[in-house]
Amino acid sequence: MTFNMIAEAAVSLLLVLGGLFAFVGSLGMLQFKDFFMRLHSPTKGTTLGIGCVLIASMIYFSVSQREPHVQELLITLFLFITAPVTGHMLAKTGLHMHLRFITGTRGSLPELMDEDVGQSRVARPLRPKPPGGLKTRREQLLKSRGR
């Protein structure tokens, strides 16, 4: 067996594994019932799937062009660092907004502290109103157009 055949086998295996991880992560979005369960699926499965595909790309281009390609490795490291942080931020936002959840996803009492959950629902920001109200704004537009 030559080095190219071993590299091709590794690339093929990583691509198949990456496709399976991404598929299972996408299925989890459909199967899970609430926000917190759905959050778990893309942060784990899809991240591993994309990581496998990027590492396969790195191996393929490094072998075929006979020079190291580290761009894919940097993208993979960035993805592995940012995806858990994003998932954590979304989970904290869901806790603060008091999103509905199935009791099976709720942590035990010592696990969820008061500062994690928050006391009341987070208010959404208000939309700014046009100065003078809608009718006054309409009159200003009509005057500026000469009507």
Image (spheres, rainbow, N blue to C red):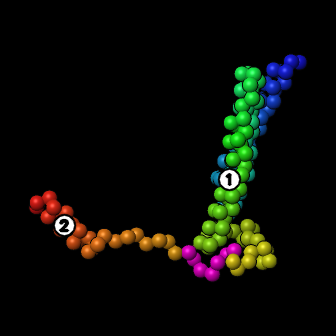
On the image, numbered disc 1 is attached to which residue? 82
Residue 42's disc is none
Residue 8 appears in the rendering? yes
**Prevailing secondary structure of the magenta residues:** loop
| Segment colored magenta | 116-122
Quadrant in the picture for the N terminus: top right
Q: Quadrant of residue 103?
A: bottom right
Foreground residue among 90 and 21: 90
Q: Is residue 100 visible?
A: no
The residue under label 2 is: 140
Across and down, in percent, residue 137 comes to 23, 68
Circle 1 Cα neighbour tier, 10 Å, few/some/many (<14 / 14–19 / ≥20): some
The answer to which quarter of the image holds residue 48 is: top right
- The amino acid type, in three-letter code, at marker 2 is Gln
Displayed quadrant of residue 93: bottom right
- Mark 2 Cα-neighbour bin, 10 Å: few <14, some 14–19, many ≥20: few
Does residue 19 appear to the left or right of 127 in the view shown?
right
The x, y position of residue 41, in whole percent, is 70, 53
Percent x, y for residue 134?
A: 26, 70
- Picture residue at 71% right of the left edge, 56% below the top: 84
Q: Residue at x 69, y 58 (%)?
A: 85
Q: Is residue 60 above or below residue 134?
A: above
In this rendering, position of residue 121 left or right of residue 111: left
| Residue 52 x/y as whole percent | 75, 39
For the C terminus, give its image quadrant: bottom left
Q: Secondary structure at mark 1?
A: helix
Q: Residue at x 57, y 77 (%)?
A: 121
